[in-house]
Image (cartoon, rainbow, N blue to C red):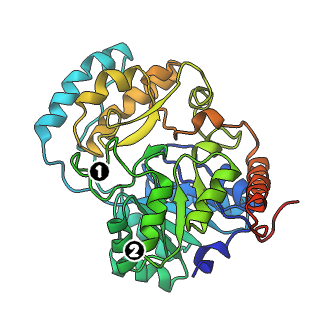
Amino acid sequence: MSSALTDLHRYPIVQAPMAGGASCPQLAATVSEAGGLGFLAAGYKTPEAMYEEIKQLRGLTDRPFGINLFMPQPPNPDPAAVAAYGERLVGEAAWYETLLGDPDSGSDDAYDAKLAVLLDNPVPVVSFTFGCPTRAVLDALAKVGTRTVVTVTSPVEAQTAQWAGADAVCVQGVEAGGHQGTYSNDPAADGMGVGLGLLSLITLVREYVQIPIIAAGGMMRGSQIAAALAAGAVAAQLGTAFLVCPESGANALHKQAMTDPLFGRTELTRAFSGRPARGLVNRFMREHGPYAPAAYPQLHHMTSGLRKAAAKAGDPQGMALWAGQGHRLARELPAARLVETLAVELDAARGALGFQPQRGAVS
């Protein structure tokens, strides 16, 4: 069962797909070459741009890698709330000398077109966020040799993914940076501030499903990976840990903020996108987060220009500084060195607990 994914990479280390530029071909290729599983993020890209990044990645490595897709979202239930939030941001647009984006720029992220590309040009792994694909989609990917992973934040979501035919689930604890991969965007049910911690969630999901679990959520050290494996995961997915690597495509201000004492904590917020996402608390989050409606991707489109203008102005207080709870533990290591360091730490932790070293362990 556990070999459904782990036979693709030497170490049980997966580089999270971070939409917005961090998960570029250089980072994914380096992680895969080092023995982890690198990922590209197709979110917010056109199908053509996704395909170009896949070609670039294949030119850098012949090792397995993954692509992450965002599931289409239902129509926004309250256009008036979106309009009201836009009114709140008029001053931000004036301050950064830019325009607010059109909230009605599309809600499917070109999902069908991206699937068509991946069926015509199969990749080793495809993962999904913000919902579960149909069995027909997962079966079609299986037929072309692609293994599939669905991001889940509850045992019920994990069961849905197993029933649909996913090869594995990525179990995302509330500690995770960036967007929570919940199936719904309901403030009453999506775990805003009260989501399950990773170790508890892994244990619960193991009781509900038989497919392999990839653990995600705030992990920055090999000892944390060891804890996730002991709880029942077959691998750990890390995002914030890789965000500060020199190969990462993240903005330099974002990288610097990870360990800047000015940004001492993270919170879940809808301020930037309309979906709960964990980031470093900054001015924009404090001022607008309490008023942001559950409207994704409408708010993402609306604030896109603001975030880009803030970055151009060198102002991290107006940027979406996505980060997991362990962000202060970030190490500015080259990605290959980080994979190796995590593997050494993992084996040391497992050795202390009396476990045998991982396959392909570094000594």
Q: Is residue 230 left or right of residue 202?
A: right
Residue appearing at x 35%, y 80% in the figure: 163
Question: Gap in Å between the C-alphas at discs 2 and 1?
Answer: 19 Å
Query: What residue is shown with label 2?
Result: 208
Q: Is residue 44 left or right of residue 212?
A: left
Residue appearing at x 77%, y 51% in the figure: 336
Is disc 1 surrounded by few (<14), some (14 to 19) or many (20+) residues within 10 Å? some
Rendered-image quadrant of the N terminus: bottom right
Check contact, mark 2 vs mark 1: CB within 8 A.
no
As drawn, 243 above or below 73: above
Residue 5 vs residue 77, the one in the foreground: 5
Q: Secondary structure at mark 2?
A: helix
As drawn, 253 above or below 181: above
The x, y position of residue 185, in whole percent, is 26, 50
**Given the image, on which type of amino acid does mark 1 rest?**
Asp
Is disc 2 surrounded by few (<14), some (14 to 19) or many (20+) residues within 10 Å? some
**Given the image, on which type of amino acid does mark 2 rest?**
Tyr
Query: What residue is shown with label 1?
Result: 190
Residue appearing at x 11%, y 36% in the figure: 80
Of marks 2 and 1, the one in the foreground: 2
The x, y position of residue 35, in whole percent, is 75, 63
**Furthest-top residue in view?**
95
Q: Is residue 200 left or right of residue 236?
A: left
Inspect this view and state whether residue 224 appears: yes
